[in-house]
């Protein structure tokens, strides 16, 4: 792969009229030449390219090392743009858009073939969202095209929540990184399919299933999210993801059980890392302890999840143990990511 110079542009999110800001204009010029630009959203950093250009999309897949059958999310800067790229906007989608856009909700609809076929990986549907971040919105406006953007990490690694995470994964492989600080939500958007009568949840994320149901009534869940023997409707959900450098295991049991698992591993000569909440810090003699926010406020756990998983990468631990969380509200997204990072391994107390 060519060793491209990567420019890092630090943008103050609170500046007025960001769209005209010289650094945003500079990034937009790069996008106009079909280069790719990493930018902050309210969830995680995205790696954006012109969604109408095969060349730009090709560059995104190449920089990430992403399998080409995994379609990208298209990001727009106002609700009206959606109608230009989809065949039809059903009522369920309209209601969800009114309730949650801009915000961490991605909606899958039938597309009208105007986008690059590389974006949709030959599917008849496209995933679209309007992010709730001033830099993301200004960049899309300045580019004057929808931006296809997966998370700006190397495929398989935890998603980036800071510009520095992006730099570590992608420096030398992309033209530009816009640094807009740490992202707020910390886990990716919720993905829902609105092409059928009943809305279907394909990926849990920043908007909970419960919050969706308040707007559109019962939401079905892609069976692949609960049973491993189904093929997921969201192609990206079948890949291993978010993996730290050492193997991760989920411990489902009391604090005594957690302590015993850690002690056993240490007694077996292992160097142990633990991912625990504030409430459970100092519980074990682990070689490295990383604090995962507060159990009493799961939004803090989501915010720090990926940087916590990444913080083990630099250190030499043989194995990492983590707490588990209730699978409701934001807990569903957190557990979905932890299970993927652990390759499904959960140690349960009898
Ligand atoms: O918060 C987010 O959604 C972030 C930020 C950057 O916007 N983006 C993100 O993109 O997480 P990515 O590529 O890492 O995940 C996109 C997910 C994948 O699981 C992909 O398979 C699914 O959306 N997806 C994309 N198009 C789809 C489609 N037409 N049908 C079903 N799933 C689709
Ligand atoms: Mg991703």
Image (cartoon, rainbow, N blue to C red):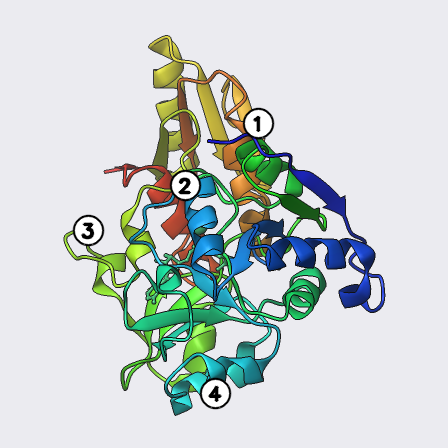
Q: Is mark 4 on a helix, strand or loop?
A: helix
- Is 312 on the left-hand or right-hand side of 238? right
> Alpha carbon of mark 2 to alpha carbon of mark 1: how far?
33 Å
Ligand 2 within 8 angstroms of badge 2 C-beta: yes
The disc, 3 or 4, on the residue closer to the chain's N-terminal end is 4
Residue at image x 69%, y 67%? 142
Quadrant of the rendered image containing residue 251: top left
> Residue at 45% across / 82% down in the picture?
214
Check contact, mark 4 vs mark 2: CB within 8 A.
no
The structure residue drawn at horizontal position 61% and vertical position 43%, both measured from the top left corner, is: 175
Q: Which of marks 4 and 2 is nearer the N terminus?
A: 4
Kindly identify which residue carries mark 4.
95
Q: Residue at x 50, y 25 (%)?
A: 313
Kindly identify which residue carries mark 1.
Answer: 282
Q: Nearer the viewer, mark 2 or mark 1?
A: 2
Viewer-side label of 3, 1: 3
Circles 2, 1 touching at the beta carbon (< 8 Å): no
**Residue that label 2 marks:** 155
Residue 234 placement (x, y as % from top left) = 30, 61
Closer to the chain start, of discs 2 and 1, is: 2
What is the CA distance from the residue labelled 3 to the residue labelled 4?
A: 31 Å
């Amino acid at each position: 792969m060519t060793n491209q110079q990567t420019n890092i542009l630090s943008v103050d999110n609170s500046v007025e009229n960001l769209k005209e800001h010289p650094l945003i204009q500079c990034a937009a010029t790069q996008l106009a030449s079909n280069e790719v630009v990493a930018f902050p959203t309210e969830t995680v950093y995205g790696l954006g390219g012109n969604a109408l250009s095969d060349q730009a999309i090709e560059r995104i897949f190449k920089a990430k090392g992403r399998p080409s059958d995994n379609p990208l999310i298209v990001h727009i800067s106002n609700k009206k743009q959606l109608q230009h790229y989809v065949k039809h906007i059903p009522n369920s989608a309209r209601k969800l858009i009114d309730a949650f856009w801009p915000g961490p909700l991605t909606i899958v609809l039938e597309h009208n073939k105007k986008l690059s076929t590389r974006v949709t990986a030959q599917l008849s549907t496209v995933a679209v969202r309007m992010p709730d971040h001033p830099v993301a919105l200004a960049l899309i406006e300045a580019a004057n095209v929808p931006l296809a953007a997966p998370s700006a990490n190397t495929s398989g690694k935890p998603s980036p929540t800071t510009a520095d995470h992006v730099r570590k994964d992608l420096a030398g492989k992309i033209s530009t990184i816009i640094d807009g600080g740490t992202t707020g939500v910390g886990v990716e958007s919720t993905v829902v399919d609105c092409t059928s009568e009943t809305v279907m949840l394909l990926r849990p994320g920043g908007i909970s299933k419960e919050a969706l149901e308040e707007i559109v009534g019962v939401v079905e869940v892609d069976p692949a999210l609960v049973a491993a023997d189904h093929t997921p409707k969201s192609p990206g959900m079948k890949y291993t993801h978010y993996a730290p450098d050492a193997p991760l295991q989920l411990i489902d049991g009391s604090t005594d059980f957690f302590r015993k698992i850690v002690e056993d591993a240490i007694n077996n000569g292992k160097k142990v890392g633990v991912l625990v909440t504030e409430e459970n810090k100092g519980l074990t003699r682990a070689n490295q302890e990383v604090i995962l926010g507060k159990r009493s406020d799961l939004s803090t756990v989501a915010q720090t999840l990926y940087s916590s998983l990444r913080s083990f990468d630099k250190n030499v631990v043989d194995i990492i143990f983590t707490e588990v969380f209730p699978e409701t509200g934001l807990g569903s997204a957190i557990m979905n990511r932890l299970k993927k990072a652990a390759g499904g391994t959960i140690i349960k107390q009898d």
